Image (cartoon, rainbow, N blue to C red):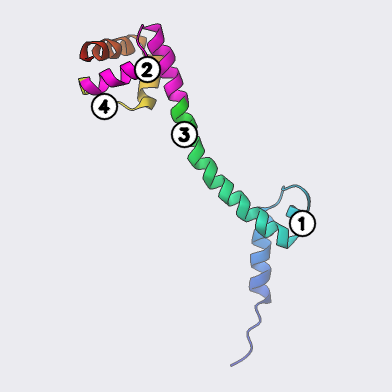
Amino acid sequence: MPRVRKGAATRKARKRIMKDVRGYRGATSRNYRLAKEARINALVNARIGRRQKKRQYRGLWIIRLNAACRQRGIRYSQFINGLKKAGVALNRKMLSEIAIFDAQGFDVLVEKAKAAR
């Protein structure tokens, strides 16, 4: 069998990595060895960031709900507890959207929560 030379495949792989790190600062955008590490770190951080984004949005919805509840004379924890006891199955994202865009609808939910407690 003839000897296999992998020059084209290696060059293609290197080009792909160097294309990914284009725009990075310093030698990480020019030096292949550093670029490999920088790309791995970037991918790890991107995955971590996707998880953190979900946490941050949930926190934002809770802050909005707490503010809307306090305006209506009930604490957030009491509101959520009342909704669970009343059997209202809405997630925090939808509740915060209702609080922002439908004040009357949110008032009804607050009354249900107060009644169920």
Q: Nearer the viewer, residue 92 or 12?
A: 92
Quick one: SS at disc 3?
helix
Amino acid type, residue under disc 4 in the picture: Ala
What's the residue type where badge 3 is placed?
Arg
Question: Residues in magenta?
Answer: 60-85
Q: Residues within 10 Å of mark 3 (few under 14, many from 20)?
A: few
* Secondary element type, mark 1: loop
Identity, as a three-letter code, of the amino acid under mark 2: Tyr
Crowding at dot 1, Cα within 10 Å, few <14 / some 14-19 / many 20+, comes out as: some
* Residue 93 picture location, percent across and down: 39, 26
Q: Residues within 10 Å of mark 4 (few under 14, many from 20)?
A: few
- CB atoms at circles 2 and 4 under 8 Å apart? no
From the image, state whether disc 4 or disc 3 is nearer to you: 3
Q: Residue at x 46, y 27 (%)?
A: 59
Question: What residue is shown with label 1?
Answer: 30
The x, y position of residue 61, in whole percent, is 43, 24
